[in-house]
Image (tube, rainbow, N blue to C red):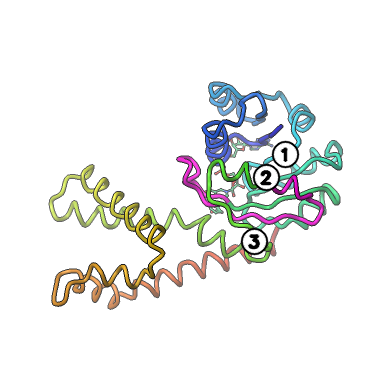
Amino acid sequence: MIGFIGAGNMATAIIKGMLEDKINKENIFVYDVNGEKLQFMSKLGVNICSGLKELVTNSKYIFLSVKPNVYDSVLNEIKDIISEEKVIVTMAAGYEIARVKSIIGNKKTVRTMPNTPALVGQGFTAVCFDELIEEEEKEKVISMLKTFSHVQEIKEPFINAYSAVSGSGPAFVFMLIEAMADAAVLMGIPRAEAYRAVEATVLGSASLALKTGKHPGELKDMVCSPGGTTIEGVRTLEEKNFRGAVIECLINTYKKNLDITKIR
Ligand SMILES: NC(=O)C1=CN([C@@H]2O[C@H](COP(=O)(O)OP(=O)(O)OC[C@H]3O[C@@H](n4cnc5c(N)ncnc54)[C@H](O)[C@@H]3O)[C@@H](O)[C@H]2O)C=CC1
Ligand SMILES: O=C(O)[C@@H]1CCC=N1
């Protein structure tokens, strides 16, 4: 039995993935303080709980899909009803397993960093397990995460880097898509056509890199004809410090993860 505290973007993404991958809707329980969110969830056919107690009682795996600033209060509310066999699954940036345990005691905890492409079953999730998690539970959690994402098991200190790269990454890719589409519109391509062309190009490029396993530099070189047009664009990006800007962007996002970990 799988429970979700909070029925927002990430819970929706994860639950849709699970349902599409044949996890039975009768095994999913949801609670949210917002009635509208629950109404939406009831349309998916999952079980709607009237409070945290009902949710925790019915769930072995409990996903904390609320915003990070609500984590402390939710954990405080459930700490007395979390028994030894329950597994808490977190997904908040900067919220360490040790912090969970400082509130609910030494209970089974899994920390994850998913991302929004989970909404279309194409997510990426970094996951780390605390030492109380048994092998069978680990396999179960990984199989759940695989219903909506590629899964990478990591050691907890690396989760801040994954938060920047794959957690926040979609936002940066969408900025690239928006900028390329703006340029296309400037060149006279209608907006909708521009988005389709750019989105297909980004998706196709990522698939080409994934499927061939070739170095991105080699794939870039394949596009650049000698004395041709693409190399002119490459020169412009180098002049504008494109790669330096991207590296700086991810490093600053990573540092923000470290900063909020200290504050929380
Ligand atoms: N959006 C993203 O790209 C990513 C988000 N995350 C993390 O996932 C978590 C959820 O994020 P989103 O789904 O984007 O947030 P969201 O704001 O869409 O959903 C949060 C839900 O929690 C509900 N809620 C608030 N207080 C509650 C309480 N006391 N009890 C029950 N429900 C309550 C809200 O009504 C809302 O529906 C956050 O911790 C976020 O940091 C992680 C990776 C990526
Ligand atoms: O911006 C945030 O805090 C969350 C973590 C990764 C993506 N969104």
User: Quadrant location of residue 236?
Assistant: bottom left
Circle 1 residue: 61
User: Quadrant location of residue 158?
Assistant: bottom right
Q: State the residue in front, 250 or 142.
A: 142
Q: Mark 1 or mark 3, which is nearer the start of the sequence?
A: 1
Q: Is residue 137 magenta?
A: yes
Asked if residue 245 is positioned above or below residue 122 in the image, the reply reads below
Circles 1 and 2: CB distance less than 8 Å?
yes
Q: Residue at x 34, y 75 (%)?
A: 241
User: Quadrant location of residue 157?
Assistant: bottom right
Q: Is residue 184 magenta?
A: no
SS type, badge 1: strand
Ligand 1 near label 1 (Cβ, under 8 Å)?
Answer: no
Circle 3 residue: 154
- In magenta, the rendered stretch is 114-140
Pinpoint residue 105: horizontal percent, then vertical percent: 86, 50
Q: Mark 3 or mark 2, which is nearer the start of the sequence?
A: 2
Circle 2 residue: 141
SS type, badge 3: loop
Identify the mark at residue 96; answer none if there is no mark: none
Circles 2 and 3: CB distance less than 8 Å?
no
Q: State the residue in front, 228 or 65.
A: 228
Ligand 1 near label 2 (Cβ, under 8 Å)?
Answer: no
Q: In 3D space, how far apart are the residues under numbered discs 2 and 3 (Cα atoms)?
A: 14 Å
